[in-house]
């Protein structure tokens, strides 16, 4: 029977992957929650998966490690179900720590002027996927660009005491690998990653 890794061992192994990328000369990194993110980078961004490192649920820890190692650009790529928590300032994304996905969606939809009917529908959803269907039906797909910008803002707030903070980007995609939103055009981000 396999023994599950302790949280310390797990974060250490993730950090080691980051250290190896940096030692190989990389200065830009894409952090993804898991395999879906890596596949998206390969298929939709035409990106080199050499720049991809898994962060699992340890978003804050991995961002801090990337800063410590001197990466100049951090790109967070993932499904809204995971990354939306960062928009609420939650940097450990396991559901046993905090959830707040629907509350975050409702708050940001309200900021964008969504009708009460949509806010109620989203609030009653059990999954981000279900909420996304309502968001699409009501024509509020622009929330994903808004959330991506908010994610970057939260990361920069977290790093506010860093002498030379990295460029932060965020890209949200659907389970069927479509780009939902980003803080700036994805082709701009992809071009910088190839530098």
Image: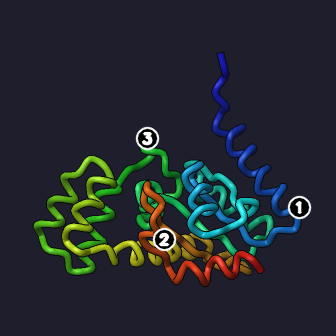
| Residue carrying label 3 | 96
Instruction: Sort mark 1 into few (<14), some (14-19) or many (20+) by Cα contacts within 10 Å.
Output: few
Secondary element under disc 3, as helix, strand or loop, is: loop
Disc ID at residue 23: 1
Residue 28 sits in which quadrant? Answer: bottom right
What x and y, as percent, mark residue 130? 27, 53
Q: Rounded to the nearest whole Å, what is the CA distance between mark 2 and mark 1? A: 28 Å
Query: Could you tell whether 119 is left or right of 43 in the image?
Result: left
Q: Residue at x 48, y 60 (%)?
A: 177
> On the rendered image, what quadrant is the C terminus found in?
bottom right
Secondary element under disc 1, as helix, strand or loop, is: helix
Going from the N terminus, do you reach mark 1 or mark 3 first?
1
Count of marks overlaid on the render = 3
Going from the N terminus, do you reach mark 3 or mark 2 first?
3
Query: Could you tell whether 162 is left or right of 118 in the image?
Result: right
Residue 165 sits in which quadrant? Answer: bottom right
Disc ID at residue 58: none
Q: Rounded to the nearest whole Å, what is the CA distance between mark 3 and mark 2? A: 21 Å
What x and y, as percent, mark residue 97? 45, 45
Q: Are marks 1 and 3 in contact (CB under 8 Å)?
A: no
Q: Residue at x 76, y 71 (%)?
A: 71
Secondary element under disc 2, as helix, strand or loop, is: helix
Query: Could you tell whether 8 is left or right of 91 in the image?
Result: right
As displayed, is residue 107 above or below residue 32? below
Q: Rounded to the nearest whole Å, what is the CA distance between mark 1 and mark 3? A: 34 Å
Residue 189 sits in which quadrant? Answer: bottom right
Q: Residue at x 74, y 76 (%)?
A: 194
Q: Nearer the viewer, mark 1 or mark 3?
A: 1
Instruction: Sort mark 3 into few (<14), some (14-19) or many (20+) by Cα contacts within 10 Å.
Output: few
Instruction: Sort mark 2 into few (<14), some (14-19) or many (20+) by Cα contacts within 10 Å.
Output: many
| Residue carrying label 2 | 151
Going from the N terminus, do you reach mark 2 or mark 1 first?
1
């Amino acid at each position: 029977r396999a023994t599950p890794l302790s949280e310390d061992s797990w974060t250490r192994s993730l950090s080691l992957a980051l250290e190896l990328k940096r030692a190989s000369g990389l200065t830009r990194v894409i952090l993804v929650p898991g395999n879906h993110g890596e596949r998206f980078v390969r298929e939709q961004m035409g990106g080199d998966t050499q720049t991809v490192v898994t962060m699992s649920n340890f978003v804050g820890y991995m961002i801090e490690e990337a800063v410590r190692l001197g990466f100049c650009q951090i790109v967070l790529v993932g499904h809204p179900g995971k990354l939306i928590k960062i928009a609420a300032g939650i940097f450990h994304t396991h559901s046993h720590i905090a959830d707040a996905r629907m509350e975050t969606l409702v708050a940001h939809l309200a900021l964008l002027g969504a009708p009460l009917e949509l806010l109620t529908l989203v609030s009653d959803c059990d999954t981000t996927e279900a909420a996304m269907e309502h968001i699409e039906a009501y024509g509020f797909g622009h929330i994903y660009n808004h959330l991506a910008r908010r994610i970057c803002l939260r990361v920069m707030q977290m790093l506010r005491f860093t002498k030379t903070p990295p460029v932060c980007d965020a890209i949200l995609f659907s389970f069927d690998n479509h780009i939902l939103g980003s803080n700036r055009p994805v082709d701009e981000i992809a071009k910088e990653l190839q530098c």
